[in-house]
Image: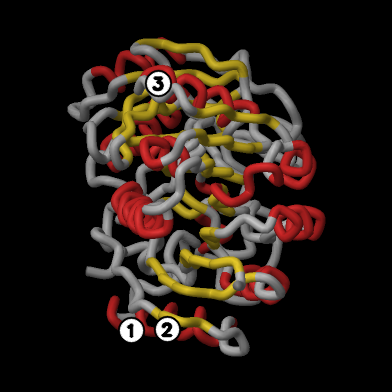
């Protein structure tokens, strides 16, 4: 069933294509970008275990009747948004149409998050409308309501709701009471007070209204503490498939190695390193986000994983300081960079290590191909495994196994 908001909300771009077509085109995209590289084994793209309601996190923005008026304008027509009289404004939550960040499309029936989420969205929108709480307008830095962040534990059933708004936003107690009786279990509710001019959902002084301010989520063999700012793959069950692939590779590659070290670069909250830690003598994780590093340490402690260390900083800066070269024979490197791919200095550092094994996890086939062309100066590509983490979008995840040339 195609979402009623498809085509205008900006969340999905491929819902009108059969899922098998989406998979075939995503796999073809990876093959296209890596066509000039020698690959020993190409693997068929892995399907997402869920094609709807698969996301564990969504950041919704607030909009009102002015957004609706802009969206409903005839194509090509321009002009100022309508003037809204007090008491006539209807506030909604939604996503931004592609290329139109200043506009928010109402998405009460979003099919990316769980069906329970629509009850939360409706409750918050009704509260904002009833109480006439103004939405934030970035162009003039006025208004209160910025974002609503919903995070869910797909394997635990726990749920976090975080309202991001100005510190003086009124009627927060009323919203807290409404969410408690909305009919959907909510584990914890937070109000993130933020008065800055930028419009970023993760910012703000967090004030816990009830619950612990965090939820638990099990990913692979590890239970993670998830806060509003935690970094995790948004498709939990697809991420578990990816971690299992890396586990199989590391088992196959490490059978005869006495001293094994995993270098986990761009480690986020430690999902890969912590899940693979039992197969290694030591895990060293590097991540630029202070919140993610804090979460990784807490998760390691909570799961009794004692053979890990995490370092905060840019991967290209910290990696050159790691004690790798003297024990390179037992080193496995995991690379999981953002869409831009690897910094050139990091590529050189990794090449200098001469580590026998590299596992590269990419969310951008183009930057992946660029980096692999550099790494294949010293490495052979054994396996390429495309994975669909984001059904109904053009995004594709890819895992690559590399081995140092003889």
Q: Is residue 326 above or below residue 101?
A: above
Q: Is residue 397 above or below residue 156?
A: below
Q: Secondary structure at mark 2?
A: helix
Residues tagged 2 and 1 counted as in contact (Cβ below 8 A): yes
Q: Which mark is residue 25?
A: 2
Question: Is residue 108 something one can see in this rendering?
Answer: no
Q: Which of disc 1 and disc 3 is earlier in sequence?
A: 1
Q: Position of residue 360 (x, y in %)?
A: 55, 60
Q: Quadrant of residue 350?
A: bottom right
- Which residue was labeled with disc 3? 214
| C-alpha separation, residue under disc 2 versus residue under disc 1 | 6 Å
User: Pointer 1: residues within 10 angstroms few (<14), some, or many (20+)?
Assistant: few
Q: Secondary structure at mark 1?
A: helix
Residues tagged 2 and 3 counted as in contact (Cβ below 8 A): no
The residue sitting at 51% across, 79% down in the picture is: 30
Q: Which mark is residue 218?
A: none
Q: Position of residue 331 (x, y in %)?
A: 56, 48
Q: Position of residue 372 (x, y in %)?
A: 64, 72
The residue sitting at 44% across, 22% down in the picture is: 306
Q: Secondary structure at mark 3?
A: loop
Q: Position of residue 9 (x, y in %)?
A: 46, 60
Q: How many marks?
A: 3
| C-alpha separation, residue under disc 3 versus residue under disc 1 | 38 Å
The residue sitting at 61% across, 16% down in the picture is: 205
Q: Which of disc 3 and disc 2 is earlier in sequence?
A: 2
| C-alpha separation, residue under disc 2 versus residue under disc 3 | 38 Å
Query: In the drawing, does residue 18 fall left or right of residue 375?
Result: left
Q: Which mark is residue 21?
A: 1
Q: Residue 140 or 24: which is nearer the viewer?
A: 24
């Amino acid at each position: 069933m195609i979402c009623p908001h498809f085509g205008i909300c900006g969340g999905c771009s491929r819902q009108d294509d059969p899922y098998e077509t989406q998979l075939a085109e995503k796999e073809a995209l990876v093959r296209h970008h890596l066509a000039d590289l020698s690959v020993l084994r190409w693997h068929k793209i892995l399907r997402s275990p869920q094609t709807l309601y698969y996301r564990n996190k969504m950041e919704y923005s607030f909009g009102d009747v002015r957004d609706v008026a802009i969206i409903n304008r005839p194509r090509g027509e321009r002009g100022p948004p309508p003037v809204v009289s007090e008491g006539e404004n209807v506030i909604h939550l939604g996503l931004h149409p592609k290329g139109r960040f200043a506009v928010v499309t109402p998405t009460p029936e979003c099919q990316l998050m769980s069906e329970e989420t629509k009850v939360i969205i409706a409750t918050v929108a009704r509260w904002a409308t009833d109480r006439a709480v103004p939405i934030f307008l970035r162009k003039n830095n006025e208004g209160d309501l910025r974002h609503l962040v919903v995070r869910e534990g797909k394997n635990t059933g726990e749920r976090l709701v975080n309202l991001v708004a100005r510190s003086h936003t009124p009627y927060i107690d009323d919203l807290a009471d409404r969410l408690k009786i909305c009919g959907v279990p909510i584990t914890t509710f937070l109000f993130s007070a933020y008065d800055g001019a930028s419009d970023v959902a993760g910012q703000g002084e967090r004030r816990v209204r009830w619950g612990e301010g965090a939820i638990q989520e099990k990913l692979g063999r590890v239970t993670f503490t998830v806060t509003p700012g935690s970094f995790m793959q948004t498709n939990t069950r697809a991420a578990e498939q990816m971690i299992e692939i890396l586990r199989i590779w590391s088992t196959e590659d490490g059978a005869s190695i006495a001293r094994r070290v995993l270098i986990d670069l761009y480690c986020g909250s430690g999902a890969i390193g912590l899940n693979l830690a039992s197969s290694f003598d030591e895990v060293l994780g590097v991540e630029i986000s202070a919140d993610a590093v804090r979460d990784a340490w807490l998760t390691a402690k909570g799961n009794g994983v004692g053979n890990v260390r995490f370092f905060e900083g840019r991967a290209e800066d910290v990696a050159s300081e790691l004690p790798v070269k003297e024990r390179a024979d037992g080193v496995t490197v995991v690379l999981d960079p953002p869409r831009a791919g690897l910094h050139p200095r990091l590529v050189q550092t990794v090449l200098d290590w001469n580590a026998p094994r590299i596992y590269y996890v990419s969310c951008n086939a183009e930057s992946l191909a660029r980096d692999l062309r550099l790494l294949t100066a010293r490495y052979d590509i054994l396996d390429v495994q495309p994975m669909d983490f984001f059904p109904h979008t053009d995004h594709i995840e890819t895992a690559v196994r590399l081995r140092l040339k003889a």
